[in-house]
Each structure stands twice: as C-alpha cells, then as structure tokens.
Image (spheres, rainbow, N blue to C red):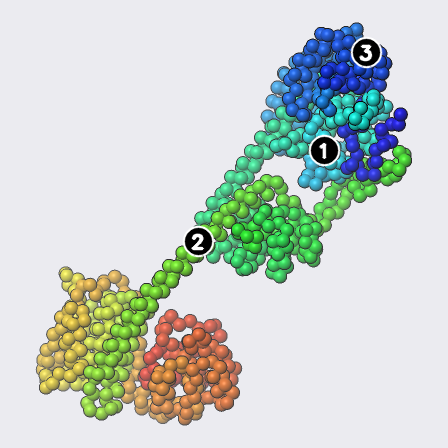
Amino acid sequence: MSDIRDQVDLTNCDREPIHIPGLIQPFGFLLALSSDWLIARASANIANFIGGHHGELLGRPIAEVFGAEAVHAIRNRVSLLRGTDATERMFGLKLAGVEHPFDIALHLSDGGIVIEAEPCQPELGDGAGTIRSMMSRLDQARTMEAFLREGSRQVRALTGFDRVMVYKFDADGNGEVVAEAARSGIGSFLHLHYPHTDIPAQARTLYQRNLFRIIADVGSTPVPVMPTLNERGAPLDLSLSVLRAVSPIHIEYLTNMGVGASLSISIIIEGKLWGLFACHHYAPRCPGLERRSLSELFGQMFAMKLEALERREMAAYAERAHGVSERLLVQLAGDASLRDDPAWLAETLGDAIPADGIGVVINGHIAIAGHAPDEDSFVRLARELNRTVAGKVFATDHIAGFFPEAERWSDRAAGMLALPISRSPRDYVVLFRQEIIRTVRWAGDPYLPKEFGPNGDRLSPRRSFEAWSETVRGRSQPFSDLERQVAESLRATLIEVVLRMSDQAHAERQQAAERQELLIAELNHRVRNILSLIRGLVRQTRGSGSIDDYVTELDGRIHALARAHNQITSDNWGPAPLRGLIETEAAAYLAGKATRVRTEGPEVLLAPTAFSTLALVLHELMTNSAKYGALSDNGHVDVRWLVDSQGWLQLDWQESGGPVVQAPTRQGFGSTIIRRSIPYDLGGEANLEFLPLGLSAHFAIPERHVSQRVAKVIAPVVEPDMASALAPAGPLISGPVLLVEDSLIIAMDAEDILIRLGAESVATASTAPVALDELRRFHPTLAVLDINLGSETSMPIADRLKAMGVPYLFATGYGEQARLPEAHGDAPVLQKPYTIENVARELSGLLSRG
C-alpha cells in the first residue's frame, strides 16, 4: 500500500490536506467506530498498547475489546458531545485485560466516533488549585506587555518546555513573537517576525477548531490508520485528533530549527485566531493528556482575560474618541467654517487617530494640510476610493499597493485611513501617515523559505532561522484594529455633522431669501419716501427768482439730507448723535468759523426719521442765519438741549451779536420747514420768535425718537464754503479728465462740476471696458472712478491708471463701508452725492500730493 504522504502535492503549502494525513503519532493508538459502535478503523500500532493485530479488530464491537464497564463510561461521555468541534476527555480509564490505565480523547468524525488513547500519566494533583494560582498571577499584570510575558511563563511552568512564545498574527497571517519565556543559553526569538507561509492558512483554520496541538517527537515514525480509505473511498478526517500526524513540510521546518517536540495552544478572541502559545523543546517531550488539557484550559482562560484587557483598552480609547466626536459636533455646530480648516480637523481627529496629514473633499471643495499629496493627486486618489471602497472605512499602510501613482509621493504620505462622509461615495476625510523606514527582524529570510528537498519533487522549508533583517520602505505605521473601529465611530459623527450642516444651510438659505424679500420691501419703501421728499423739495423751493439761486437752495437742502443720511448709515441705519448733526451742518456752512456755533447738552441719539427731519430744520436755520442773521455778521449761535423727565428732547436755538432782526413779511418754504416739520413728521413742537437781538427757536421731540445711550463719536465733515470752492486762486484742474460713473444723470452732474473746476474736457464711461478703451485713446490729467459699476468694479481701471502714472480718486455711495484693495488703499475716497464742495476738496488733496 502506498504511503499517503506520497500522494500529497507539496508544491503549495496552502493546499496541503493536513487534516487527512491517514497517520497518527506513535505515543498513542486510535480506533474509529461506526454509529453502531463497531470498530471501522484502527491504527497499526494498537498491539503495542492492548495486544491483538489491528486487522483482527476491524468489524468487532468495541465492548469486546475495551470491556463493558469501560464502554459504558465512554458511552456516557459521548452523550455530552455537542457541536461539530466538540471533544471530551477521560483520565485513568481501565480497559479489560490491560494492566495500565489510559487517558482517552473522544470526538465525532464522518458520522462515527473516534477514540484516541495514550497511557495515563497521573502527575498533577490539584488541577483546579493550579489554574487558580496561574490566574491570580495573570491578574497582577498591569500592562499588556507584562500580561503576555506572565502568560508565557505560566505555560512554560505547566508544560516544562524549553521555550514558550506568545505568537501573534497580523491581518495577513504573518506572525510576531510578542512575549517569550525560555531556559537560559538557547537565545531569544522575542520580536522576530515569521512569514504567513510558516503557518499556512489551512493550519490556522485547524488551530481555530482544535485548540491544542502536540508533536511529541519530531523524529518519530508516524503510524497509519487502517484502512486508509473507507467503503466510500474517503480518508478519515482527523481535524480534531489529538494524535494526528504532522505534515512532512512541518517536520522539516522543526528539524531545521533543531526542535525535538512542539506544543501549540490556540488563543481565540471573538471567534478569531488572535495567536498561539508556541512551545518548543529541543528533545522529545510528551506531557500527559491531563496536563495538556489543563494547559488548554489555561489557554482559554488566558484568552478571556486578554479579551477583557483589550476591551478595557478599547473602552478607554473609545471614550477618548467619544470626546473627540462630541468636540467635533459642538465646535462644528458653532463654527461651520472649521469644516474647511483641515489643520484644525487633523489636530482634533489626531487625538483619537494619530496622523501626519489630512485631505478633505466636501461638495467638490478640497482642503489639504500637513504631510499629504498635492491637490491634483488627492483628487485622483478620491476618485479611486469612489471606484473601489465606497461607503466603508478603508485603511492601508501602503497606498502605492492600492494606488500605484502614490509611489511618487510615498515619502510624504505612505499610509492612509479614508472615512467616507456622505450618502453617496464622493466626500472624504482622509488621514495620512508618513513613510517609516524601519527594520523588520525575520526568523530567517522570508523570501527564500523553500528549496527542492529530499522528498523528491517537493518544496522544503528554509533551513536558516538566524535573525534576518529587512529594511521596509514605502510603508507607514499601520492603522490598528482599534483605530479602524474608532474611525467608524468618527465617520458616523462626521456624516451627522455634514447632514446637519446641509439641513442648516438649506434653512439659512430659506431665511436669507425671506430676509432679502423684507429688505427689498423696506428699501422700496425708503426709496419711495426719499423720492417723494426730494420731489416735494423741488416743487416747494422757490429761490429769489433766478435759476442759480433756485439750484443753490435746492442743492443745499438735498445735500443736507445726504449728510444726515451718511451719519444715519454709518452705524447700519441706526440712531445717530445730535451733536454730530449740528457740528456737521455748522462745518458745511462756516468752514473755519464753525466755532461760532456753540453747543451744550448731553450725548443724545436720534432715530433715523427724526434725524433726517431735524437735519432739514437745522439746515434752514443755518442758511437763514448765514444770509440774514447772526452768522452773516460777527455774531454767534448757541444751541442747547436737554432730555426732560418725560424723555422728550428740548432743543433751543438762540442767535446773538448779529444785525437787528425783523420778522419776515412773507413765509417761504424754508420757514415752513422750520415751523411745521417737527410737529407734522414727529408729533413734536416748534416755536420761533424774531427778537431784535436775534432769532430764538424752541423745538420739542417726543421720547420715542430719543435715546440717551452712549453715542458713537462721528467727526464732522468739514467742507469749504461754496464761495471758496467756486472761486479758487485759479482753475483747480486742467486738461482732459476721465469720469467713470454708471448713472447718466449723476454723470452729467459730475461732469458739470468738473468743467466748472477747470477741466478742459470730460470723457465719461459707464463700464470698465469702455473706460479702458478711452485710456487707449487719450491720456487724462486725472480720473474720478465710481467704485461699483453694477456687476463689476472700477479696480481694473485703477490698475491701468496707476501704471500710467495718472492721479485718480474713487467715488462711492457706501460711505465708511467702502473697502479698497491694498494696491489702492491710499487713494482718496469721495462720498456721494457729487457736490462742487466735496469734489473741490478731494481734488485739492489729491493734486497737492504732487
């Protein structure tokens, strides 16, 4: 009969059928029973233990061989077997006609019962006490390293093997010795790595089913189980066998290492093979089944404690990650812009998952910080993630293995953890880790593990197990299982944030649209009121008969409104200071003599409506006083005010030191404004007395228009009087001027002012392209630029003028809210509306710079 070993193709260790070798180790015997308890198979060495040739036993009832009493005990124990991988043990069982007792291992296979027996070795005593003491020692370990080291020490004490290693598998099946206990003088394997081929996939699968494996004598000759094949032509499945023989490849492996016996105890956590207690002895060694069973029990309890320790570490880690999640929710909810700050996001996430760089893509927006690929490479990487790993956290310590292009920038980012954060696979937060050039110490060269050996056309395991160092490049520190689990939690948080922000953005857009509608309605209301007010001023202004006087009076009144409007809008259309209004009006008419208007009163703010109304009243009072009253001569005006107990503003205007005053013979529009505006518009009071020593007026403004909170200080706009503007020492400007203004009516008014100030000609343009065409046609002596031109600005024109060396100033209706780019920050800004006074003032300042 051919040896089954000759039928096994060993060109690929992963395909070797190690669970059906048809052989057992010789330190015990095996019987396979049919379901009716007849002997169906027997190992060829059975005569060495209980007498009788194995061929003579086939087909006989087991009771005839073991005796009724032993079979009764075995039947009772078999009834306890539950599940496909269940095993039972019996110790010190007496068999009929045999002097020495046996230890028995039982399991089910191929619909029958497998009995494995070996001579009993009563050597323990109090097994429960032994385990209790071992567990107590484990409980004293405070760190994972100490726990693993203590576990290896306890197994070595229990089994007596020369070397006991705690061997941990990684995700690829490679192993590392993470703890070791060994007798002195045999060297150390601690922290050596072993390739996955040392323990191939099918062996790792068996370690999950059969938690204990002994090879008592590497040099022993295996014993066949007869017959090799049953009536269906199938070999006996020995996956759960205690005596199962060893693969020839593994025998060569152990021989090359100089090992005489080995023992393995599986460490199973959450149903997965975490690692092994791997025990080596440098001579044959076979602890008894009872001691081995106790070692197996220790291995199971060790795994439970290891799982609890890992869970505690994970719980502490998860708690820290939960804190990161809460911080993300709170801070991003309070400041959505942080989502676009990758440095902040990397620092925050780094508290849970250390990383060297980060890339974020949300709704097509890319943000990158730290050690990461450039933006174009990151976009292509995100596309590859969309194609292959959509919807799941994906981690790798070797991006180039997944995305070959990454080889170019592996020095910056070699590993990554990608968190999809949207419903569809397009948005990501990707954490990057730098390349770590590290040395891995292998137990022999992992890339030359086999060569053609003595068993014919078969492969042999490597023969050298000296420490062999490999320099690893293009890889980062791997992301651990804990980090991947935490990443899933953080991903859920980030998805919640993104969805919440999306909902919030939608709500904000809706609110903004509603606010815009309200603002447009309010703007329409105010514009209609202003236009109606100006229309009334136009219709009611009479002048003294000449067109020039008419224009002058109307211009003054409209400009008074404009000045008031500037002060109201300087604080976002809110109450404005009374004192600032008086000082601005005085400065507009008296220039350097504004001190002839003396003010006294507390800081008071007026609501916009009252402020505009009082501006017109004060304008008329200033105009009349400058023409006919105290300010036309060398007199003074005293303006005093207070807020009474009812909250009303009481304001007094008193002129003195001017010509003798006489009451007017007729009431003009200006007098009507003074007498009727405050009572009509504000519900207040107005009284005028034309006393010989000077005009006296008293006004009362109701409490609802008055505020006494601290007023914002606004410097009065000091303007030269019209006479000085109209009559400079000579023409203020000369040559051609460029005027850029998008309103035709306003442009015509400004053009007229520039001509009156000396411009030879004025070229007007309403858009930037037209203005630039004009600059290609002629070279102006100066330019006036309206900042906002509908959907564009005049900055390109300013850039061109600056390059040409042409002086320019800006004009705007935005007042103090106008913001200029840094390149033009020193240019003067003229506040609209255009008047000959403010244009002359700003041009004088501009041209005086040289």
Towards the viewer: 832 or 698: 832
In this figure, which residue is indicated by the disc labeled 2? 503
Callout 1: 10 Å neighbours few (<14), some, many (20+)? some
Check residue 270 in the rendering and tell me which mark sits there, or answer none. none
Residue 445 % position (x, y): 80, 41
Query: What residue is shown at x 20% (from left), y 63% (from top)?
Result: 704
In the visual, does 741 lie left or right of 613?
A: right
Tell us which disc is closer to us: 3 or 1.
Answer: 3
Residue 415 % position (x, y): 65, 50
Q: Earlier in the sequence, mark 3 or mark 2?
A: 3
Identify the amino acid type marked 1.
Arg
> In 3D space, how far apart are the residues under numbered discs 3 and 2 (Cα atoms)?
81 Å
In this figure, which residue is indicated by the disc labeled 1? 204
> In 3D space, how far apart are the residues under numbered discs 1 and 2 (Cα atoms)?
50 Å
In this figure, which residue is indicated by the disc labeled 3? 50
Circle 1 SS class:
helix
Above or below, 170 against 62 in this view is below
Residue extending furthest toward the front: 232
Identify the amino acid type marked 2.
Asp
Quadrant of the frame with the N terminus: top right
Quadrant of the frame with the C terminus: bottom left
Residue 453 % position (x, y): 88, 36
Circle 2 SS class:
helix
Query: What residue is shown at x 72% (from left), y 39% (from top)?
Result: 174
Quarter location, residue 836: bottom left
Identify the amino acid type marked 3.
Ile
Towards the viewer: 59 or 415: 59
Q: Earlier in the sequence, mark 3 or mark 1?
A: 3
